[in-house]
Image (cartoon, helix red, strand yellow):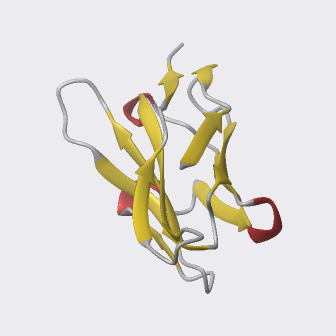
């Protein structure tokens, strides 16, 4: 089994910053893509940013220039540095990992989510 633990969410004023972390542990042979998604109340879950095993990165347009995704492969950890936060960034942020387990089976996992609230 694989566990994903997210941290770093919270309440921040507009213009502020937060750094989210996602640590993957368990039956992990290798990790392909890692990504951050978010879901605001009464809205569908949407992709925020994704980073591949080769460090290819994609951001949704609304966060380009403000958010930075990165990963530490040695620690099976992914980060999302969020700067210049706006109220519309308020959502539950989810970590998603696409990996091979020790049986060489490919699986996709979700974290439990961390709340990010941007408000004055």
Residue with the most extreme front position: 103
Could you tell me which residue is drawn at 68 percent across and 32 percent down? 8
The mark tally for this picture is: 0
- Residue 12 can be seen, yes or no: no
Residue with the most extreme right position: 74
Left-right relation of 82 to 59:
right
Left-right relation of 73 to 86:
right
Q: Position of residue 82 (x, y in %)?
A: 62, 45
Q: Nearer the viewer, residue 53 or 60?
A: 53
Could you tell me which residue is drawn at 63 percent across and 60 percent down? 68
In the displayed structure, 19 sits above or below 51; it is above
Q: Position of residue 114 (x, y in %)?
A: 52, 29
Left-right relation of 106 to 42:
right
In the displayed structure, 34 sits above or below 42; it is below
In the displayed structure, 45 sits above or below 50; it is above
Q: Position of residue 44 (x, y in %)?
A: 19, 40
Q: Quadrant of residue 3?
A: top right
The quadrant of the rendering that contains the C terminus is top right
Residue with the most extreme top position: 120
Left-right relation of 93 to 67:
left
Residue with the most extreme bottom position: 54
Could you tell me which residue is drawn at 41 percent across and 64 percent down? 107
Q: Nearer the viewer, residue 14 or 50?
A: 50
Q: Nearer the viewer, residue 106 or 15?
A: 106
Q: Position of residue 34 (x, y in %)?
A: 53, 64
- Residue 32 can be seen, yes or no: yes
């Amino acid at each position: 089994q694989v566990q994903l633990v997210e941290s770093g969410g919270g309440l921040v004023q507009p213009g502020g910053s937060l750094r989210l972390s996602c640590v993957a542990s368990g039956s992990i042979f290798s990790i392909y893509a890692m990504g951050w998604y978010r879901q605001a109340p009464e809205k569908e879950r949407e992709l925020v940013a994704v980073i591949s095993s080769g460090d290819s990165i994609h951001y949704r347009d609304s966060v380009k220039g403000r958010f930075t995704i990165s990963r530490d492969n040695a620690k099976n950890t992914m980060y999302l540095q969020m700067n210049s936060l706006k109220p519309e960034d308020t959502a539950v942020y989810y970590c998603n990992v696409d990996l091979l387990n020790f049986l060489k089976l490919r699986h996709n996992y979700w974290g439990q989510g961390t709340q990010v609230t941007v408000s004055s």
